[in-house]
Image (cartoon, coloured by chain):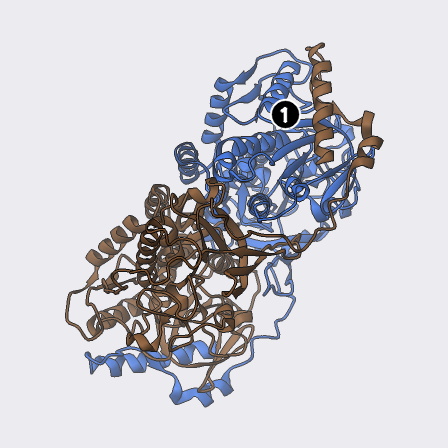
Chain colours: A brown, B blue
Amino acid sequence: MAWFRSLVRVAAIETRKASSNPLSTTPTLYSLKHLSTAASNQRRDPQPTPIQYSGLEPTRPDEKPRVVVLGTGWAGCRLMKDIDTKLYDVVCVSPRNHMVFTPLLASTCVGTLEFRSVAESIGRIQPAISREPGSYFCLANCTSMDTNNHLVHCESVTDGPDSLDPWKFKISYDKLVIASGAQPLTFGIQGVKEHAIFLREVYHAQEIRRKLLLNLMLSQVPGISEEEKSRLLHCVVVGGGPTGVEFSGELSDFIIKDVRQRYAHVKDYIKVTLIEANEILSSFDDRLRQYATRQLTKSGVRLVRGIVKDVKAQKLILTDGTEVPYGLLVWSTGVGPSPLVNSLELPKSPGGRIGVDEWLRVPSVQDVFAIGDCSGFVESTGKAVLPALAQVAERQGKYLAQLLNSIGKAEGGKANMANGMDLGKPFVYKHLGSMATIGRYKALVDLRQSKEAKGLSLSGFMSWFIWRSAYLTRVISWRNRFYVAINWLTTLVFGRDISRI
Amino acid sequence: MAWFRSLVRVAAIETRKASSNPLSTTPTLYSLKHLSTAASNQRRDPQPTPIQYSGLEPTRPDEKPRVVVLGTGWAGCRLMKDIDTKLYDVVCVSPRNHMVFTPLLASTCVGTLEFRSVAESIGRIQPAISREPGSYFCLANCTSMDTNNHLVHCESVTDGPDSLDPWKFKISYDKLVIASGAQPLTFGIQGVKEHAIFLREVYHAQEIRRKLLLNLMLSQVPGISEEEKSRLLHCVVVGGGPTGVEFSGELSDFIIKDVRQRYAHVKDYIKVTLIEANEILSSFDDRLRQYATRQLTKSGVRLVRGIVKDVKAQKLILTDGTEVPYGLLVWSTGVGPSPLVNSLELPKSPGGRIGVDEWLRVPSVQDVFAIGDCSGFVESTGKAVLPALAQVAERQGKYLAQLLNSIGKAEGGKANMANGMDLGKPFVYKHLGSMATIGRYKALVDLRQSKEAKGLSLSGFMSWFIWRSAYLTRVISWRNRFYVAINWLTTLVFGRDISRI
């Protein structure tokens, strides 16, 4: 800090000088000339950065117990929102400092909503993290865990041209909540990671939007071949789950409403194809599925049944040999365990997720819990692994926050202090129904509790209205509720923005 | 298009089949199996892309004359907005498909305004470009000009991991308007381009915002050294013109209002230093300058007089030997001619800009005009080169649109048809005053017509109000006026968004 103190010192001197001559044209511009040599000798070069930082030691007896939360998805964020920060210090480790409101992410790819309207910063979800002296947010990945010693190893995350070498540090925990989510499945198909774009993070949506607008503009280069124009403007979506269907719906809506008007030169070339190996929206009611199929077809989405075998830079190949040239490829075929989860030597559930008992504890280790897409019931509980849905993750986060709060109140917050404690009721999941939008003011709402059960299912404008209202009230902060409403309004009035920024 | 026709054909067959069995669970999911082999034999591989496209030939006698506009800044956009598209086809060549509302760009770096609120797509500024059959927007750079044959050589611009090799094409013009702007001056100082961020485009503002939030988060890594924390959070701005001062003001406002609240762990480490070789805001009235200096100092910006000699990855070195470590370096020391302008064999103005006469024509060549920061009066006009201001560029665009419209009405629109035509009044620039904001509801408004003249100058809250209102009415579309107002409102009510997306 020597350089800084010397700057301040000069500033103070110069201010006094300047004030004696208030009409000078440069009253408080400081000169550093006087002590340049002395100052630069004092200074140490900050460049050789030590790569290992101390991190956080175990909490002392006079400190609050520390809950370390890995991840900022639905599960982790709901937990952090509800946890009692008078009982615990919260340290969150995640490569992103915000939660993504995933059900609305598809709408941002074409500009119906803005990116920031669907991202909620952790500081807003749990203000204590940025204010309490013992709470932190670390922009980092957890690389490994030492459950015997109650600590996690982390590595800072940076990006961009100036990115630093990752810094390594350790964080000791009293309670650990693993909520690090899952990763997109590629089924080992070559080229998916290189050429397709997933749709799980805000930067995915940004990439899709930039690529779509780029292709629309490239296809207008005077003299381009018909073949190339058709390829550039062929948008292929692989995977017919809610995300793939919602994105296809938004895309066809964008084409009908905006591309036809603003890209008149190429409007007849842009096409959307949705490729699915089985049925689209397979978890929905039969009649809803047929309705979705009719609506998507009507709005110009071509539904193709096929299995992708190989992905090249500008075409994909199906198992039957068909080659499908594309300009934009969005991959949305479900999720599976992440490399971190695979690497952990913890009990596993069927399907390779981190195994948990009915109280969402990881059996055989102390003070470790797992929630959301990264976790599943171990076989011995006799319960099925729950689907990877926002709804499940959010309910688990809420449950675990209450559980940890009651443990904390009973003085069980510190490491190894909750042994043999009565944890109360186990976690039970009750499905509240599924929703999906299919573009053009149409949506599906399936209120049945399981695939086999009977119950209410809705489609059309009313369910679109319910869908929009339901999401508006679930967006967490008032700021974002407000922006989502404003975005929908301006899209309706002015159309979508097509600036490629 | 063989692949596309075959997809459609199968789709048609399958739709008929499916409709005979309306309750099938997969009514219109098409199978492609039947003609896989045949189809894939027919298909040509689209990958070997021809790199040279034909472009646009000279206009035929039955077509409208074609105005080619290079650039989408203030000058080019004002021209395109006002040009009569009944008289002319407009072809715009630019590496960005939007105009940046530069006076508000500094506000987007810290989230006071959103990026999209300050970007206006060309399609909104001149809808004919996306609708008229002879008008185009080309996402491309002009690489050279052949003024004897009335044509420009262009190269398409792509980016991102999948970027294509640039496509080359030629565009013939009847009238050419060069409005390609200037580029930031680095005075040959090593390391500026590599380590500093300019503040001229939306992507610059995005980079600054991401870097600032990254450094705020990295500085919270538990165990980081005091030295490194201070470096990461030292924001240095080089250049005390309106852009540098506005950005410093916004940054200190962000620190006072948001960082203190949301980054309590590091709030005492973040500092802003503004380095200027001469005086800040040198074009403004003396008293306004003193006011700005007092206000900036009061809000924590340290003003340092110095000349940068060298820029390294984490520190810069002044000519007096002082080393200044930084985490974020923003460079804003004015603009100079771009490589394209330097390479052109056209008459030049003092300072190396493209030379123009009183009617903004480039002397010695036919049908070529230059406006905005890339142009300046040739010495023989006896007029001084105008400053590189949005105000000048916008006025020139407006003037030239009227001039071209009157030429077009007099049947002089086609190539070589305006020779000897009476062009009416020459372009005269009248300065309407300068404005700059300095954060915290304070701004400067200098209504004098030149540095020497007497006239009104204002500072403080009222001029902040005038500044905001003036800009609100100058933002071009209603959509963006609305978003700017909404952004200001939510910043006031909810604070700025700190999600790093």
> Which residue shows up at 76% across the image and 29% down it?
B306
Which chain is indicated by disc 1?
B
Query: Residue B412 versus residue A91: which sits nearer the camera?
Result: A91
Q: Residues within 10 Å of mark 1 (few under 14, many from 20)?
A: few
Residue B148 horizontal side relative to residue A183, left or right? right
Residue B336 horizontal side relative to residue B498, left or right? right
Q: Is residue A30 above or below residue A313?
A: above
Q: Is residue B336 above or below residue A246?
A: above
Question: What amino acid type is highlighted by mark number 1?
Answer: Val
Location of residue A419 in the rendering, given as x and y in whole percent from the top left corner: 37, 62
Q: Residue furthest right?
A: A37
Q: Is residue A5 above or below residue A78?
A: above
Could you tell me which secondary element the residue under label 1 belongs to?
loop
> Which residue shows up at 61% across the image and 56% down it?
B58
Query: Residue B415 versus residue A86: which sits nearer the camera?
Result: A86
Location of residue B213 in the rendering, given as x and y in whole percent from the top left corner: 55, 45
Q: Is residue B298 visible?
A: yes
Query: Residue B52 versus residue B272: which sits nearer the camera?
Result: B272
Location of residue B382 in the rendering, given as x and y in whole percent from the top left corner: 76, 25
- The residue where tag 1 is placed is B428
Could you tell me how many numbered marks the image carries? 1
Q: Is residue B405 visible?
A: no
Location of residue A383 in the rendering, given as x and y in whole percent from the top left corner: 28, 74
Q: Is residue B464 above or below residue A282?
A: above
Residue A425 horizontal side relative to residue B135, left or right? left
